[in-house]
């Protein structure tokens, strides 16, 4: 992917929200909610947002959102991986092929697309349960 793709995957006001979160944290007000919705549907505290989305955070172990070059945590996983996304996910959650490519130490990586659902997997609980159970039975 090109470097300028980063803008497509981060929230439009990402830089402003990171600054706002950092100011709140520095002023001992990390529990203060940020001024804008995150991903257009939820409010988040400054400290939570900073911990989740700061590019140097330990939580940035799947850096698809920022199109980072730094995948060191993910690249070191050496156990089987199963991951899935809904077919109606936003683009930033549909990079399972990228995850597979970045899982350099994993020789057993499988991903599935769950049809007709988004990130919440509403009414897909049984289907997902079956996928996970079959995956476990086939490996262990």
Image: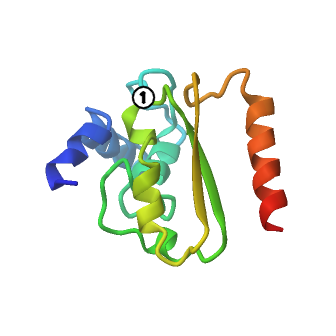
- Residue 105 in percent (x, y) is at 52, 78
- Residue 121 in percent (x, y) is at 65, 28
View extreme (front): residue = 138
Does the rendering let one see residue 29? no
Q: What residue lies at 38% left-to-right and 25% top-to-bottom?
A: 36
For the residue pair 64 and 82, the one nearer the viewer reads as: 82
> Against 80, is 136 above or below?
above
SS category of the residue bearing label 1: loop
Q: What residue lies at 38% left-to-right and 64% top-to-bottom?
A: 56
Left or right, 66 with reference to 102: left
Residue identified by numbered label 1: 39
> Against 83, is 101 above or below?
below
For the residue pair 123 and 111, the one nearer the viewer reads as: 111
Left or right, 96 with reference to 5: right
Quarter holding the N terminus? bottom left
Q: What residue lies at 55% left-to-right and 26% top-to-bottom?
A: 118
Q: What residue lies at 75% left-to-right and 33% top-to-bottom?
A: 127
- Residue 104 in percent (x, y) is at 46, 75
Residue count near mark 1 (Cα–Cα under 10 Å), binned few <14, some 14–19, many ≥20? few
């Amino acid at each position: 992917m090109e470097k300028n793709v980063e803008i497509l995957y981060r929230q439009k006001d990402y830089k402003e929200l990171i600054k706002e979160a950092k100011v709140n944290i520095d002023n001992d007000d990390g529990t203060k909610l940020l001024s804008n919705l995150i991903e257009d549907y939820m409010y988040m505290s400054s400290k939570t947002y900073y911990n989740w989305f700061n590019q140097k955070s330990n939580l940035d172990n799947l850096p698809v959102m920022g199109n980072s070059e730094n995948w060191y945590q993910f690249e070191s996983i050496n156990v089987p991986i199963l991951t899935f996304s809904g077919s109606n996910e936003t683009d930033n959650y549909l990079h399972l092929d990228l995850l597979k490519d970045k899982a350099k130490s994993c020789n057993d990586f499988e991903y599935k697309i769950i049809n007709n659902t988004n990130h919440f997997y509403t009414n897909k609980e049984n289907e997902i349960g079956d996928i996970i159970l079959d995956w476990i039975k086939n490996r262990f």
